[in-house]
Amino acid sequence: MKLNPQLETELATYVSSLYPIDCALGTNPFGPPNLGFEAISGLMTGMGEYYSYSHLAELASEVSKYAIVNAEQITFTNGSMGALELIFNKVLSNDKKSMLGIGPQFVEAVSEFKVSGGSYSSLNMFDYADEESLFLALQSEIRKQKPTLVYIDNPNNPTGRIYARQHLVNVCKVCREVGAILLVDEAYGEFIEHEESMLFEAAKCDNLLVLRSFSKGMGLAGIRLGYVVSSPSLSKYLHSSVVPFGPSLASIKIAKAILPDIEAYLAKSKFRTRHYKLAMMRQLEECGFEVMETSPKTPILLVKKSFVNLAKLLDDNGIMVASGSHFKETNPQMDEQYARIRIVGNDQDLWQFQYRLRQFARVPESTTP
């Protein structure tokens, strides 16, 4: 066949046919839960005044039923970042405070702690063959360092791995021995089962703080609402630290409206998360990427491609991700060879993600569905 050979090479153009696939920010890719007409129509009611604290009391009642904790244990904040800022800057004494963690982990928490005047150190999770040896080493380091605070994000951000609850319970006991607080950040907590969470331990452990957020699993990043569940002895410090009218009335109303039916939304979200994550992991591995230890239940994963600026490679192909170098402060091993990827939220983006990976990896299309 007589075909134009010029078309076998890339033509010079500034127009790209690749639309951006956002796999960068840790939001819920499936969108927010539905808000009923009654909630929408009543959203502006009372906005001209400072709200009555009965609104917060009602929200605390709804959250306590969902999280299966006492309402008195709950402190509401402006997102989980607001909770971290509150704890680091107000609840903790500023006298030579230190934080110990497992890296890589949520870097904004570490940055915020250091800005507040604290020092930070971490164990490299990749140095340990299994989770048990990692947590035994952590317990040993806690006894050695006697930190003010031990910070563990579970599920872990950026890897998406889930730590066994018993390991965290054991760490909490060691923290109590040395007078340290254990802060478990469950921002992605809606993607784990209730029995995997540390929420229930807060009533028994007087040195435990558990963070939750409406931004991730609940799909409401825009309302900037989070909460801390704590022991009664710590709750009084948290309640005394919050500024009046912290969470907005709009965020309180939206949260109250979605909570009664949230389990159905979460069940669908969890099912779709597993489906898309497994499909993306399979394609990444087929194209020669190393997927670090993770759980299929969470919407994020950490990927490595040796000797490649991975975030740039993906960005050049219209796939936006978070570079591993952003997490270097929490683990020196993290560099441009790593990237955190959040799953896609629909079949079109999944197909495009797989197609673009195959194009620059030059891998034939898989027959695996």
Image (tube, rainbow, N blue to C red):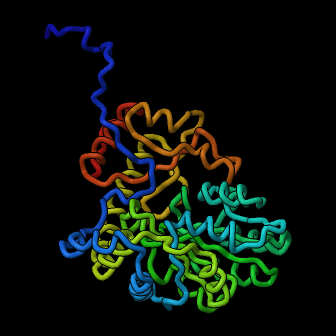
In the image, taking residue 364 as reference, residue 137 lies left or right, namely right
Instruction: Give whichever of 221, 21 is nearer the camera.
Output: 221
* Image quadrant where residue 63 sits: bottom left
- Quadrant into which the N terminus falls: top left
Instruction: Give whichever of 234, 178 is nearer the camera.
Output: 234
Q: Is residue 343 above or below residue 241?
A: above
Residue at 39 percent across and 86 percent down: it is 58
The single residue placed furthest to the left in the displayed view is 1
In the image, taking residue 40 as reference, residue 101 lies left or right, namely right
Q: Is residue 363 above or below residue 299?
A: above
Instruction: Give whichever of 88, 215 is nearer the camera.
Output: 88
* Image quadrant where residue 93 sits: bottom right
Residue at 51 percent across and 61 percent down: it is 160
How far across and how far down the image is residue 357, in percent? 38, 38
How far across and how far down the image is residue 88, in percent? 68, 67
The single residue placed furthest to the right in the displayed view is 144
In the image, taking residue 256 as reference, residue 155 lies left or right, namely right
Instruction: Give whichever of 240, 74 is nearer the camera.
Output: 240
